[in-house]
Image (tube, grey):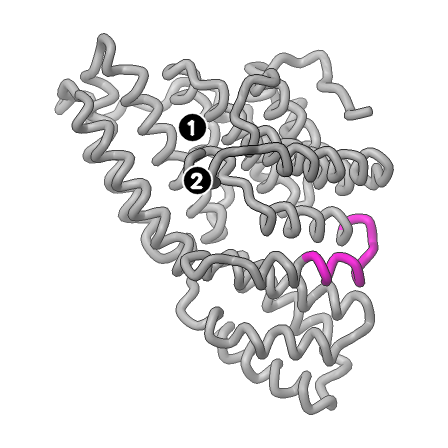
Amino acid sequence: MVARLTALGEDDMLRRRTVLTAGAFSLAGFAAPPPADPARASARRGGAGDVERIRETARRFGDLDDLYGGGHARHAVAAYLVHDVAPLLHGTTGRARPDLFRAAAELTYLAAYMAMDAGANGLALRYYVQTVRLADEAGDRVLRATSLRSMAVQARELGHDQEALSLADAAASALGGRAPGRTVAWVTGMQAEAHAGVADRQDALALLRRTEAQLERVDSLPEAEWTGNYRRESLEHQTGLALTALGDHVAAAEHYAASAGSRRPVERRTRAVVGLRCARAHLQAGDAERAAAAVLGLRPTLEGVVSARVRGELRLLRWGWARCRSDAHVAEADVLVAGLLR
């Protein structure tokens, strides 16, 4: 049922131009080893304390990303990677090495996601590829799959649907059926969304049903799994994205609303993105007033979020309801959106 990978292996997928060719998704330039790093000169040996420190830093920056968007503190994350983490990677050998590379991969993954949210997509892709390399060095297939899955998200958002499908399938292949249940569901949901992106309705809906069944079977708390911290509201969002790609905007709006309404307080940026996608689904279904109401309801959430993805959704809404600005609710929402874009 699910489309198979091409004859390319997973490593070839990260090396050859034939897989990702559109715009920022040409990976040919990322196949060579990274340039010499001045951090090598200050390399030092790391241990368990360093691993915990890197992970705690990732948790703190992750909370800032959730609250205020990827544009808020991503330069600080990049500086920390270069000046604090890289010297440890160059200097650590022995039993501490896999855990250190795993922690570095987690932080690099966060840097990738923040760069993507900030609109620096070429940089984000480089970080994602580096996350795969670090995960491989640590021998962590789940982290490898996590990065491939998020590369698929990026490809979908940039309109590279076939590449997104290849990457989503590569993420599933990397897991090999051996991963925490939430992570498996997280990747299956991405496969569903990617199939919808290439207009494969039957497989997309079947994979969504499989994702829901996988999620219902998990017995761990979401916070127990760093990779694929997948919840019901995440599935609602992915279902909305799949239905949007398939042209079912009324049903998509319902799923977006369910996702945005059940987000935790820390997830301000995600609630903003999903809520605006809900508004756009209403607009695509021909209901400009409900779209405006959805945006106005997001006013407290939108203020203070620094996210290119949020700004992109706001621009699409302004363009979409341009002919409806004589409506009082639309006009009020348009004033809000125009102010946020300034």
Could you say which is closer to the camera, residue 243 or residue 160?
A: 243
Dominant secondary structure of the magenta stretch? helix
The answer, for residue 262, to whether it is visible in the render is yes
| Looking at the image, residue 95 lies above or below residue 192 | above
Residue at image position (67%, 22%) is: 18
Is tag 2's residue or tag 1's residue first in the polypeptide sequence?
Answer: 2
> Which residue, given by chain and number where applicable, does mark 2 sit on?
112
> In the rendering, at what x and y percent does residue 109 appear?
42, 35
Quadrant where the N terminus is found in the figure: top right
Amino acid on which the number 1 mark rests in the picture: Thr
> Which residue, given by chain and number where applicable, does mark 1 sit on?
131
| Looking at the image, residue 311 lies above or below residue 122 | below
Kindly report the distance in space between the C-alpha atoms of the residues bearing marks 2 and 1: 8 Å
Which residues, given as a range, are shown in magenta? 245-255
| Looking at the image, residue 84 lies above or below residue 295 | above
> In the rendering, at what x and y percent does residue 231 appear?
56, 45
Left or right, 161 with reference to 85: right
Q: Categorize mark 2 by other alpha carbons within 10 Å: few (<14), some (14-19), many (20+).
A: many
Residue at image position (69%, 74%) is: 291
